[in-house]
Amino acid sequence: SKDYADNGVNYSQWTATVDFTSLTADTYKIEVKVKDTSNNETISTVTGIKYKTDTSAPQSPSMTIKTASPTNTTAITIGLSATDDIGVTGYYLAESSSTPKASATGWKSVTSAASYSSDVTYTLSAGDAAKTVYCWFKDAGDNISSLSSGTITLDTKKLNATIKSPTANTTITTKSLSLDVRVKAKQAQISSA
């Protein structure tokens, strides 16, 4: 116990843990009885304590890759959303379709919400290719949603372009000029500047 005074009145404070593990979801009251050395008894009651069990996984898991594909950067923006009867408490993004354990590192915690929605940043793995990103949500009961996924292409290779004509130090005497540009390695859209 901890003793303290408040406005000239002395108090003793105790801390106790109430275990709801064996209870079913319902509304309860907590009642505390205290007796002094003269055997005087006082009862203090708190009503309306709602206990909810969390046994169902988050529903309607959704992810939308908002960065345009193809992209030349590994940092992309993803829109996330899910619902839960108690509250979504985290999300997990990966390029592997293996469902993570609730205790796995990599879960991002969020403020518990029955309807969660947010835009987040994710970093793709290196290497140019089509990348599939998978997403799961979890709740306070460590229930994990089904997966949602999206695909984006990472393309960081620059074009190999060469101007064949005109050559350096060419004098032009006309008002127009024909260019001979050669592009290697992949398809490209050519724009003039």
Image: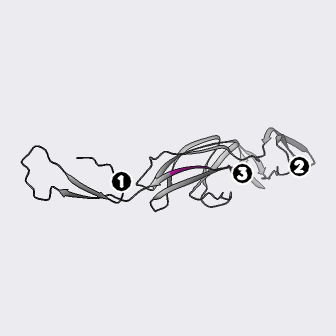
Q: Residue at x 52, y 51 (%)?
A: 151
How far apart marks 2 and 3 lie (CA) works out to 46 Å
Q: Amino acid at mark 1?
A: Gln
Residue 149, image x, y percentages: 58, 50
What is the crowding at mark 3: few (fewer than 14 residues within 10 Å), some, or many (at least 20)? some
| Residue 149 inside the magenta-drawn segment | yes
How far apart marks 1 and 3 lie (CA) works out to 46 Å
- Report the residue marked by disc 2: 36
Residue 92, image x, y percentages: 60, 54
> Helix, strand or loop at disc 3?
loop
Q: Earlier in the sequence, mark 1 or mark 2?
A: 2
Mark in the foreground, 2 or 3: 3
Within the image, what quadrant is residue 47 found in?
A: top right
- Report the residue marked by disc 3: 143
Q: Is residue 53 left or right of residue 107?
A: right
Within the image, what quadrant is residue 101 found in?
A: bottom right
Q: Quadrant of the N terminus?
A: bottom right
Q: Amino acid at mark 3?
A: Asn
Mark in the foreground, 1 or 3: 1
Provide the residue span drawn in magenta. Answer: 144-151
| Residue 143 inside the magenta-drawn segment | no
Q: Is residue 188 left or right of residue 43?
A: left
Seen in the picture, residue 6 relative to 183 is either above or below; the reply is above
Q: How many marks?
A: 3
Q: Earlier in the sequence, mark 2 or mark 3?
A: 2
- In this rendered view, identify the residue nearer to me: 18 or 81: 81
- Report the residue marked by disc 1: 187
- In this view, the residue farthest toward the right is 39
What is the crowding at mark 2: few (fewer than 14 residues within 10 Å), some, or many (at least 20)? few
Q: Residue at x 93, y 48 (%)?
A: 39
Residue 119, image x, y percentages: 52, 45
